[in-house]
């Protein structure tokens, strides 16, 4: 891990336990890599979790958009690059790129982080954070800010209780778990015949241990691919905790052949 002219870089090798049945990395793993890279960079520059907690503040992820140009496979060696794009009063944009061993950019992402008060969980000013690391407003993983995802509702949502293994050190559901819940709500046919090309998530409210979650999923045809909207509702609060939009394209030949062999 190292920083070069304000750009954080770290390597990751895809392990077997991080892959789906066809040998391709699970999307939640990429989300974990992005989140960990952002955290490591913030720690290096002095505004990580422990630093902010001393000031009674926390960073929370508000929105993220990830574009998959190519899905990494088992044993692939990846290089993550991440940087702060800008600072506003209470939020900051951070972008990402992931490269394969050949130096090709295969994954791009952009994210919106909000600084909140640890006690009342409301947005607060970033303060001196902007003085600790340069921002690169002209450098983009994805040029636009993560978009707002529409809410959807179904008559018979899948309902389950939040479990211990889904709670993180902030004592709430980790943001990557919502992505997994959304993907798990899809039929087997979707992930056997399609490849995820992009995912956008809006995080709206916290979900905690034993809360009941409703999963509402609507799938729309999009040319030869699919567009899926998922709303994850915290039943205890009566509010949407997260809204997710995923886009799926027909699986390329390599992926499809492995799917057929495993089916």
Image (cartoon, grey):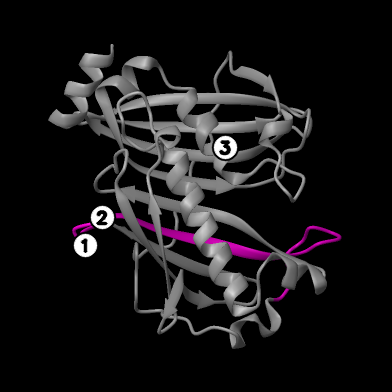
Residue nearest the observer in this picture, 33 or 57: 33
First in residue order: circle 3 vs circle 1: 1
Residue 166 drawn at (x, y percent): 67, 35
What's drawn in magenta, residue-wise? 100-125
Q: Quadrant of residue 10?
A: bottom left
Residue 258 in the figure: left or right of residue 127: left
> CB of mark 1 within 8 Å of CB of mark 2?
yes
Residue ID for mark 1: 103
Residue 113 drawn at (x, y percent): 58, 63
Q: CA distance from mark 1 to mark 2?
A: 5 Å
Query: Residue at the location (31% across, 31% down)?
Result: 23
Residue 123 in the figure: left or right of residue 97: right
State the SS at label 2.
loop
Q: Is residue 148 visible?
A: no
Residue nearest the observer in this picture, 153 or 124: 124
Q: Is residue 135 visible?
A: yes
Residue 154 in the figure: left or right of residue 23: right
């Amino acid at each position: 891990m190292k920083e070069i002219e304000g750009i954080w870089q770290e390597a990751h090798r895809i392990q077997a336990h991080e892959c789906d049945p066809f040998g391709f990395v699970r999307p939640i793993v990429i989300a974990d890599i992005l989140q960990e890279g952002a955290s490591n960079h913030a720690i290096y520059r002095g505004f990580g979790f422990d630093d902010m907690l001393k000031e009674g503040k926390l960073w929370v992820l508000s929105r993220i958009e990830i574009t998959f140009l190519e899905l990494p496979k088992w044993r692939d060696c990846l290089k993550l690059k991440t940087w702060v794009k800008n600072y506003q009063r209470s939020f900051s944009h951070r972008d990402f790129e992931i490269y394969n061993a050949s130096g090709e950019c295969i994954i791009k992402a952009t994210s919106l982080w909000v600084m909140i008060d640890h006690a009342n969980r409301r947005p607060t000013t970033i303060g001196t954070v902007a003085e600790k690391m340069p921002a690169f407003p002209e450098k983009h993983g994805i040029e636009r800010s993560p978009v707002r995802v529409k809410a959807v509702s179904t008559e018979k949502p899948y309902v389950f209780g939040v479990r211990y293994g889904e709670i993180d050190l902030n004592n709430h559901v980790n943001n990557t778990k919502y992505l997994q819940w959304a993907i798990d709500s899809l039929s087997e046919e979707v992930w056997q015949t399609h490849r995820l090309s992009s995912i956008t998530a809006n995080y709206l409210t916290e979900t905690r241990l034993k809360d009941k979650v409703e999963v509402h999923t609507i799938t729309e045809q999009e040319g030869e691919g699919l567009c899926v909207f998922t709303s994850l509702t915290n039943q205890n609060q009566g509010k949407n905790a997260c809204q997710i939009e995923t886009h799926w394209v027909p699986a390329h030949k390599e992926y499809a052949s492995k799917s057929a062999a495993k089916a």
